[in-house]
Amino acid sequence: MPSVNFRLFLVSDRHQTGSRSLLSVLKQAVEAGVPAIQLRERDLPTPEVLLLAQELQAITAAHAIPLIVNDRADLVLALNLDGVHLRANSLPVSAARRLVGAYRLVGISTHSVEEVRRANQDGADYVVFGPIFDTPSKRPFGPPVGLGALTDICRQSTIPVFAIGGMTSARVHDVRRAGAHGVAVIGAVLARDDVAAATSELLVSLKP
Protein backbone atom coordinates (compact mmCIF):
# COMPACT_ATOMS: atom_id res chain seq x y z
CA MET A 1 0.00 0.00 0.00
CA PRO A 2 1.43 3.42 -0.92
CA SER A 3 2.31 5.75 1.92
CA VAL A 4 0.18 8.80 2.71
CA ASN A 5 3.10 10.85 4.00
CA PHE A 6 1.47 14.29 3.73
CA ARG A 7 -0.93 16.15 6.03
CA LEU A 8 -1.93 19.04 3.76
CA PHE A 9 -3.83 18.19 0.59
CA LEU A 10 -4.50 21.06 -1.83
CA VAL A 11 -7.52 20.55 -4.10
CA SER A 12 -7.64 22.61 -7.29
CA ASP A 13 -10.51 24.86 -8.35
CA ARG A 14 -9.69 27.41 -11.03
CA HIS A 15 -12.89 29.30 -10.16
CA GLN A 16 -11.37 30.38 -6.83
CA THR A 17 -8.15 31.97 -8.07
CA GLY A 18 -9.62 35.32 -9.13
CA SER A 19 -7.84 36.86 -12.10
CA ARG A 20 -4.81 34.61 -11.66
CA SER A 21 -4.23 31.45 -13.66
CA LEU A 22 -4.69 28.18 -11.79
CA LEU A 23 -1.20 27.02 -12.70
CA SER A 24 0.44 30.19 -11.37
CA VAL A 25 -1.37 29.85 -8.05
CA LEU A 26 -0.58 26.15 -7.72
CA LYS A 27 3.07 26.85 -8.55
CA GLN A 28 3.23 29.38 -5.71
CA ALA A 29 1.74 26.83 -3.33
CA VAL A 30 4.22 24.16 -4.44
CA GLU A 31 7.15 26.51 -4.00
CA ALA A 32 5.85 27.34 -0.51
CA GLY A 33 5.94 23.64 0.38
CA VAL A 34 2.47 22.22 -0.25
CA PRO A 35 3.06 18.45 -0.11
CA ALA A 36 0.28 17.06 -2.35
CA ILE A 37 -2.17 18.30 -4.98
CA GLN A 38 -5.44 16.93 -6.29
CA LEU A 39 -6.39 18.13 -9.79
CA ARG A 40 -10.17 18.49 -9.62
CA GLU A 41 -11.36 20.50 -12.64
CA ARG A 42 -14.38 18.30 -13.24
CA ASP A 43 -16.13 20.64 -15.66
CA LEU A 44 -13.27 20.73 -18.19
CA PRO A 45 -13.34 18.53 -21.31
CA THR A 46 -10.78 15.75 -21.49
CA PRO A 47 -8.26 17.46 -23.83
CA GLU A 48 -8.09 20.48 -21.51
CA VAL A 49 -7.76 18.35 -18.35
CA LEU A 50 -5.00 16.37 -20.07
CA LEU A 51 -3.07 19.52 -21.00
CA LEU A 52 -3.54 21.00 -17.52
CA ALA A 53 -2.38 17.75 -15.90
CA GLN A 54 0.73 17.69 -18.10
CA GLU A 55 1.59 21.29 -17.23
CA LEU A 56 0.97 20.73 -13.53
CA GLN A 57 2.97 17.50 -13.56
CA ALA A 58 6.01 19.44 -14.72
CA ILE A 59 5.70 21.57 -11.59
CA THR A 60 4.97 18.80 -9.08
CA ALA A 61 7.57 16.40 -10.46
CA ALA A 62 10.28 19.02 -10.07
CA HIS A 63 9.46 19.14 -6.36
CA ALA A 64 8.78 15.39 -5.97
CA ILE A 65 5.25 15.85 -4.64
CA PRO A 66 2.27 13.61 -5.49
CA LEU A 67 -0.17 14.74 -8.17
CA ILE A 68 -3.51 13.00 -7.82
CA VAL A 69 -6.26 13.39 -10.44
CA ASN A 70 -9.95 13.49 -9.66
CA ASP A 71 -11.81 10.44 -11.06
CA ARG A 72 -9.67 9.99 -14.18
CA ALA A 73 -7.82 6.71 -13.79
CA ASP A 74 -7.18 6.81 -17.53
CA LEU A 75 -5.20 10.06 -17.21
CA VAL A 76 -3.29 8.65 -14.24
CA LEU A 77 -2.11 5.78 -16.44
CA ALA A 78 -1.54 7.92 -19.53
CA LEU A 79 0.71 10.38 -17.68
CA ASN A 80 2.07 8.02 -15.01
CA LEU A 81 0.68 10.18 -12.20
CA ASP A 82 0.70 9.36 -8.49
CA GLY A 83 -2.91 8.45 -7.86
CA VAL A 84 -6.62 8.87 -8.43
CA HIS A 85 -9.19 10.49 -6.15
CA LEU A 86 -12.73 9.17 -6.46
CA ARG A 87 -16.10 10.69 -5.75
CA ALA A 88 -18.34 8.74 -3.39
CA ASN A 89 -20.64 7.82 -6.32
CA SER A 90 -18.07 7.17 -9.04
CA LEU A 91 -15.80 4.22 -9.83
CA PRO A 92 -15.55 1.72 -6.94
CA VAL A 93 -12.26 1.70 -5.06
CA SER A 94 -11.62 -1.93 -6.00
CA ALA A 95 -12.04 -1.18 -9.71
CA ALA A 96 -9.78 1.86 -9.52
CA ARG A 97 -7.16 -0.21 -7.71
CA ARG A 98 -7.20 -2.81 -10.46
CA LEU A 99 -6.64 -0.08 -13.01
CA VAL A 100 -3.92 2.00 -11.35
CA GLY A 101 -2.15 -0.80 -9.47
CA ALA A 102 -0.94 -1.38 -5.95
CA TYR A 103 1.69 1.36 -5.86
CA ARG A 104 -0.44 4.39 -6.74
CA LEU A 105 -2.69 6.20 -4.29
CA VAL A 106 -6.43 5.62 -4.38
CA GLY A 107 -8.46 8.03 -2.25
CA ILE A 108 -12.15 8.77 -2.02
CA SER A 109 -14.44 11.57 -0.87
CA THR A 110 -16.87 10.50 1.85
CA HIS A 111 -19.80 12.13 3.62
CA SER A 112 -21.03 9.43 6.03
CA VAL A 113 -19.89 6.68 8.39
CA GLU A 114 -21.07 4.06 5.91
CA GLU A 115 -18.97 5.50 3.09
CA VAL A 116 -15.88 5.65 5.30
CA ARG A 117 -16.36 2.04 6.41
CA ARG A 118 -16.74 0.93 2.81
CA ALA A 119 -13.59 2.80 1.79
CA ASN A 120 -11.66 1.01 4.53
CA GLN A 121 -13.04 -2.38 3.51
CA ASP A 122 -12.42 -1.82 -0.19
CA GLY A 123 -8.76 -0.92 0.19
CA ALA A 124 -8.62 2.87 -0.21
CA ASP A 125 -5.39 4.51 0.93
CA TYR A 126 -7.15 7.50 2.51
CA VAL A 127 -10.51 9.23 2.75
CA VAL A 128 -11.48 12.88 2.60
CA PHE A 129 -14.42 13.49 4.94
CA GLY A 130 -16.70 16.48 5.28
CA PRO A 131 -17.78 19.17 5.05
CA ILE A 132 -16.74 19.71 8.67
CA PHE A 133 -17.50 23.45 8.71
CA ASP A 134 -19.60 25.56 6.38
CA THR A 135 -17.96 26.53 3.12
CA PRO A 136 -19.54 27.60 -0.20
CA SER A 137 -17.73 24.99 -2.31
CA LYS A 138 -19.10 22.12 -0.23
CA ARG A 139 -22.71 23.24 0.29
CA PRO A 140 -23.96 20.94 -2.52
CA PHE A 141 -22.77 17.99 -0.39
CA GLY A 142 -25.00 18.86 2.56
CA PRO A 143 -24.77 20.81 5.82
CA PRO A 144 -21.55 20.80 7.83
CA VAL A 145 -21.20 17.66 9.94
CA GLY A 146 -19.07 19.16 12.72
CA LEU A 147 -16.20 17.95 14.87
CA GLY A 148 -18.26 15.31 16.66
CA ALA A 149 -18.90 13.41 13.44
CA LEU A 150 -15.24 13.77 12.48
CA THR A 151 -14.16 12.30 15.83
CA ASP A 152 -16.47 9.32 15.33
CA ILE A 153 -15.23 8.75 11.77
CA CYS A 154 -11.58 8.89 12.79
CA ARG A 155 -12.15 6.33 15.55
CA GLN A 156 -13.64 3.92 13.03
CA SER A 157 -11.13 4.39 10.22
CA THR A 158 -7.84 2.53 10.02
CA ILE A 159 -6.72 4.61 7.03
CA PRO A 160 -5.85 8.34 7.12
CA VAL A 161 -8.77 10.78 7.25
CA PHE A 162 -8.44 14.26 5.74
CA ALA A 163 -10.96 16.79 7.01
CA ILE A 164 -12.41 19.16 4.41
CA GLY A 165 -14.83 22.08 4.51
CA GLY A 166 -14.02 25.47 5.98
CA MET A 167 -10.48 24.49 6.92
CA THR A 168 -8.24 27.29 8.23
CA SER A 169 -4.97 27.27 10.13
CA ALA A 170 -6.93 28.29 13.25
CA ARG A 171 -9.12 25.17 12.98
CA VAL A 172 -6.32 22.68 12.34
CA HIS A 173 -5.72 22.02 16.05
CA ASP A 174 -9.36 21.05 16.57
CA VAL A 175 -9.55 18.70 13.58
CA ARG A 176 -6.25 17.07 14.49
CA ARG A 177 -7.46 16.60 18.07
CA ALA A 178 -10.55 14.93 16.62
CA GLY A 179 -8.21 12.37 15.02
CA ALA A 180 -7.82 13.66 11.47
CA HIS A 181 -4.56 12.77 9.77
CA GLY A 182 -4.61 16.11 7.99
CA VAL A 183 -6.72 18.62 6.09
CA ALA A 184 -7.79 19.10 2.49
CA VAL A 185 -8.21 22.71 1.42
CA ILE A 186 -9.38 24.70 -1.57
CA GLY A 187 -10.17 28.35 -0.94
CA ALA A 188 -7.97 28.55 2.17
CA VAL A 189 -5.02 28.64 -0.25
CA LEU A 190 -6.35 29.31 -3.75
CA ALA A 191 -8.49 32.30 -2.84
CA ARG A 192 -5.87 34.01 -0.70
CA ASP A 193 -3.95 37.01 -2.04
CA ASP A 194 -0.73 35.66 -0.57
CA VAL A 195 -0.75 32.01 -1.56
CA ALA A 196 2.70 31.31 -0.11
CA ALA A 197 1.78 32.78 3.28
CA ALA A 198 -1.49 30.83 3.38
CA THR A 199 0.34 27.61 2.57
CA SER A 200 3.01 28.26 5.18
CA GLU A 201 0.42 29.03 7.87
CA LEU A 202 -1.32 25.71 7.28
CA LEU A 203 1.94 23.78 7.23
CA VAL A 204 3.04 25.30 10.53
CA SER A 205 -0.31 24.57 12.16
CA LEU A 206 -0.10 20.92 11.00
CA LYS A 207 3.26 20.27 12.63
CA PRO A 208 3.04 17.75 15.51
Image (tube, rainbow, N blue to C red):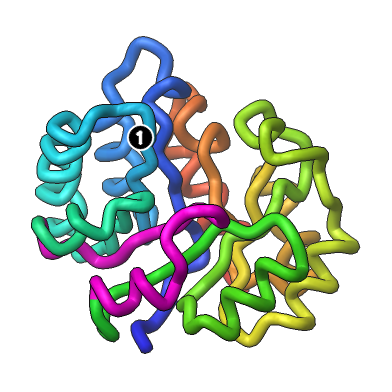
> Is residue 135 rendered to the left or right of residue 21?
right
Q: Quadrant of residue 64?
A: bottom left
In this image, 125 relative to 68: left or right? right
* 60 lies above or below 178: above
Asked if one can make out residue 154 in the rendered structure from this viewpoint, the answer is: yes
Decide whether residue 82 is among the magenta residues: yes
Q: Quadrant of residue 81?
A: bottom left
- Apparent side of residue 77 relative to residue 21 in the rendered image (left or right): left
Vertical placement of 58 versus 157: above or below?
A: above
**Depth order, front residue of 113/82:** 113
- The foreground one among 58 and 72 is 72
Residue 162 in the image, given as x and y percentages of width and height: 60, 63
Q: Position of residue 196 (x, y in %)?
A: 40, 38
Query: Bounds of the magenta span?
Result: 79-100
Let me know if residue 138 is in the magenta part.
no
Name the residue furthest right: 148
Mark 1 lies on residue: 41
Q: Residue at x 67, y 44 (%)?
A: 165
The crowding category of the residue bearing disc 1, from other C-alpha atoms within 10 Å (few below 14, some 14 to 19, many at least 20), is some
Q: Secondary structure at mark 1?
A: loop
- In which quarter of the view is residue 36 placed? bottom left
